Image (tube, coloured by chain):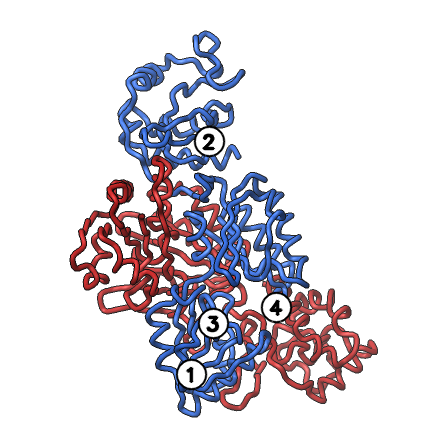
Chain colours: A blue, B red
Amino acid sequence: MISVIGIGPSREDMSIRALNAIKAAEVIIAYKAYIKPIEDLLEGKEIIKKGMGDEIERAEIAIQKSKEGQKVAIISSGDPGVFGMGNVVFQLIGKYSDTEVEIIPGITAATFAASKLGAPLHDFAVISLSDILTPISEIKRKVESASKGDFVIAIYNPLSKTRKEPFEVAYKILMENKKPSTPVGIVRSHEEGVSAIVTTLDKIRDHEINMSTTIIIGNSMTYIQDGYMVTPRGYVVRSDIHPLSREFYERFLEGEVVEGPNFECEFYPCHEEGENCTFCYCPFYPCGDSSTGGHWIKDKGVWSCQNCDWIHKDKTVQCIQTKFPEIVKEVDDLKKRKKELLKLRRECIKETE
Amino acid sequence: MISVIGIGPSREDMSIRALNAIKAAEVIIAYKAYIKPIEDLLEGKEIIKKGMGDEIERAEIAIQKSKEGQKVAIISSGDPGVFGMGNVVFQLIGKYSDTEVEIIPGITAATFAASKLGAPLHDFAVISLSDILTPISEIKRKVESASKGDFVIAIYNPLSKTRKEPFEVAYKILMENKKPSTPVGIVRSHEEGVSAIVTTLDKIRDHEINMSTTIIIGNSMTYIQDGYMVTPRGYVVRSDIHPLSREFYERFLEGEVVEGPNFECEFYPCHEEGENCTFCYCPFYPCGDSSTGGHWIKDKGVWSCQNCDWIHKDKTVQCIQTKFPEIVKEVDDLKKRKKELLKLRRECIKETE
């Protein structure tokens, strides 16, 4: 039996199953650097260390040792199925009959990095920028489709000392397809531990990036809050309808409100000259996420829209109007159908980017 | 301190860090179903069970308990940052000052499912089909871009008893953009354990799919081998150049071989009438992966191209010719520059799909 074992990003993050499988193995085959975190588990075992680039050789040795009746463990960092040894082993076992293989999963860099940054993931794409085995055209296509699809993107193997082209190519595509202010997290493992930096897409180059770095690039809703990267999923923060908002929407539903700028209003402009007052009171209040600039007033339980004028842009109003009448037929729907409203908000954020 | 803890897909797959964090916690907050796998760790702790849909409430309780000075653990299945409690908690802590949160990552369904199927992942996209909080237009866009980008796709929350539309929509897009024969893995957790099925895209509907199912859809290179799903990364299987191939490529490099079908050849057609003989001997032999139909003859160490006529298609020849002269300047480059050649093969597989 060959066990291909993912030891995750660190010893503490290894699974109980992986720990037990290492203990049970008689032969351990690993890239040199992966031996260190598990050294104390290896007494009495045969250890075969190999260099980077010897992947096929590692797999062949494992198969031979296993055929000799030994319990073999191949060690992968992270998860063995994510740019790890799993694919190599499965590619090679086709050569032989009666070779049993099990994959023991581990925590992969995307979720580990995310855990150090806050909560940046939603639907996400994992892309390796290593062009050693992958043509640059394939890397380009992937970065482009993931950007256009508005995925959160986790980048593995972004840069090495000699391999810089794929990063340049990918960065160019990202800058063309995402806002320069898109939040980005850079997580780097080094001897002293792990460092996590939250920055924006246009400032990636100000930070050290190497082969031990995972980069997470936000989607159009990702925001930075207290130094953390957050991609909201769209949960409803419950709240009552404010009496003034209720009064406004009663008139709105009667068709009695001004569309566009309301020059007659004594408060005009609340935000800035030319603002669209169609949705004078925001129908999503409180959205509870900062994608459009709002924020909580700490410890008061009050959501402030001071820095959000998104609802007063013409394009936003246009987009919301397409579905608003279907969702809100009476004022209480602002509360009762808030989930639907927040989904409409998501659609329109993407559309008005 | 609030720890948002990913317990992975099963107790055995939980990390050591998660295990210790649960032990250290004083208050455990969890969706009911997540209590069972950790029940033996909970003695003496306050347990707060909540239902599905109470995510915001779970987070608010955690914050309050933490403000009272207690060590709080919120339990997520899989990884808390992948459609788990991480995002909800980070969305809500913005309301308060001085709330410390740590995310403890876990093995997520994509890599767990992959480990049961073989080695299906390469660059991959994770997409949830739940439209409870996500507009269907967003789900559509993601499935479409991931398909067009030729990602391996891991689908979470594919179907529930009441929520069928997103699956129908996604399936239609997948069928339009991928070959019906694309390998697909279906991994389902149930009371007796985990079942893993390897099938093809056109046959997905023959299998049971529910909310506890993760579906992994291959890319254009994924193949099925001995019941496993394998996406090759492109490693070079070393081998000497066959003397007949050497002789052929000596003539090839002198411009002395026939382009197109070679009706003069005594073996014509090797594969089928009309085949293109420009690359009579395959320059990628042995590619060692079955994406184009080849396979190992078990226990003989011999690669058979019997079921692969890809190199003899006109479109393939055309694509390979664009870069072949740059890579192979002398016959030994077939061996020395095999990595480059296999990258060219990857490009052309995608192009000739």
Q: Amino acid at mark 1?
A: Val
Secondary structure state at the residue bearing disc 2? loop
Earlier sequence position, callout 2 versus callout 4: 4
Nearer to the camera, B107 or A51 = A51
- Labels 2 & 4 near each other (Cβ < 8 A): no
The outermost residue toward the left is: B44
The residue labelled by disc 2 is A293
Q: Are marks 1 and 4 on the same chain?
A: yes
Q: Amino acid at mark 4?
A: Leu
Q: Chain of mark 3?
A: A
| Disc 1 to disc 3: CB gap under 8 Å | no
Q: Position of residue B285 (x, y in %)?
A: 64, 80
Residue ID for mark 4: A133
Report the residue marked by disc 3: A76
Residue B297: give its label. none
For residue A302, which quarter of the picture? top left
Mark 1 to mark 3 CA distance (whole Å): 13 Å
Query: Residue B116's x, y, as percent?
Result: 37, 70
Check the residue under mark 2 and report the chain it is in. A
Q: Earlier in the sequence, mark 1 or mark 4?
A: 1
